[in-house]
Image (spheres, rainbow, N blue to C red):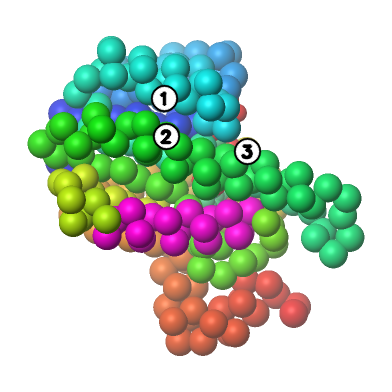
Amino acid sequence: MKTTNNTVLISGGSAGIGLEIARILSAYGNKVIITGRDRSRLDRALSQLENVTGIVSDVSKKADAETLAATLKRDFPGLNIVINNAGRALLYDIADSDGAFEKAEDEMLTNYLAVIRLNEMLLPLLKQQADAAIVNVSSVVAFVPGGLPTYSASKAALHSYTQSLRIALGRSSRVKVFELMPPLVDTEFSAVINGRNGIPPQKVAEDFVAALEKDDFEIRVGKTQAIYELYLKSPAEALRAMNPGT
Ligand SMILES: NC(=O)c1ccc[n+]([C@@H]2O[C@H](COP(=O)([O-])OP(=O)(O)OC[C@H]3O[C@@H](n4cnc5c(N)ncnc54)[C@H](OP(=O)(O)O)[C@@H]3O)[C@@H](O)[C@H]2O)c1
């Protein structure tokens, strides 16, 4: 996949991994559109970036997704890369918690169902382009759950869907499907799970852009690769590694 002269949508591009991907892709001469729920957070991000447009949009809201898709079709008809990056994680003890269903519903909507909805809305536009890609941002916990119980399940669902989408679009179109699987990354998102011990979001963005260029569709950043290899060798050992003390 070329890494210049694209028109790229990044959901949740006002902070963390999405912001760092926006920074690199805009510097490489791509037109970048970032979304987020909070206008002032978007404006802060835009003030650091060149050639980037910010649109307030919540991926979990159907009406927002419809408005976003219509705006992109009208104002950015060359859109050829969609990066589904916005995510939601809730830390709680699944053995002893009220509201596990609502928490899981919330995570599934943002991390899984909203991705399917936005892809469905934007695929007709992507299919018109000579070179197009969908990038779904899952996680190391897509293979092996760790710490965040129903968040891990939502990323496992996203991983499975991404594989099916790649196969289906490979048969019927030129749209490539990538999956970015970061390990623990030091962002606001991971503050409650010792994110300080994670790798910087800039490293994830650099590895992502290098993989995009090489058509490396399954992008296992940093420790995700080691956990993946352990998982292939022994799922039980990988589960223990992700859940120390069990
Ligand atoms: N950090 C990690 O350790 C880690 C590890 C593996 C995978 N990931 C995945 O990487 C992705 C990005 O995480 P991050 O760590 O970069 O998070 P982050 O630093 O908290 O940034 C999240 C971004 O998404 C936006 N956002 C959140 N909910 C949204 C929604 N419903 N609709 C639209 N935008 C939304 C946020 O802006 P607003 O709050 O203003 O909406 C912000 O721009 C997520 O999918 C996450 O699951 C993270």
Residue found at the far left of this picture: 130
- Residue 205 rendering spot, x and y as whole percentages: 37, 44
Res 224 label: none
> For mark 3, does the 10 Å Cα neighbourhood hold few (<14), some (14 to 19), or many (20 or more) residues?
few
Picture layout, residue 190 above or below residue 16? below
> For mark 1, does the 10 Å Cα neighbourhood hold few (<14), some (14 to 19), or many (20 or more) residues?
many
- Residue 93 rendering spot, x and y as whole percentages: 82, 59
Q: Assign the C terminus to one quadrant of the image.
A: bottom right
Q: Which of marks 2 and 3 is nearer the N terminus?
A: 2
Element carrying mark 3:
loop
Question: Mark 2 is on which residue type?
Answer: Leu
Name the residue located 62 percent from the left edge and 71 percent from the top edge: 242
Q: Distance between the residues labelled 1 and 3?
A: 17 Å
Q: Give the number of the mark in front: 2 or 3.
A: 2
Q: Distance between the residues labelled 2 and 1?
A: 14 Å
Can you tell me whether the CB of the residue at mark 3 lies under 8 Å from the nearest atom of ligand 1?
Answer: yes
Element carrying mark 1:
strand
Task: Give the residue number, with chain letter if any, for mark 3.
Answer: 188
Can you tell me whether the CB of the residue at mark 2 lies under 8 Å from the nearest atom of ligand 1?
Answer: no
Res 118 label: 2
Can you tell me whether the CB of the residue at mark 1 lies under 8 Å from the nearest atom of ligand 1?
Answer: yes
Question: Is residue 237 in view from this perspective?
Answer: yes
Magenta stretch: dominant SS? helix
In this rendering, position of residue 5 left or right of residue 182: left
Provide the residue span drawn in magenta. Answer: 151-167
Front residue of 3 and 99: 99
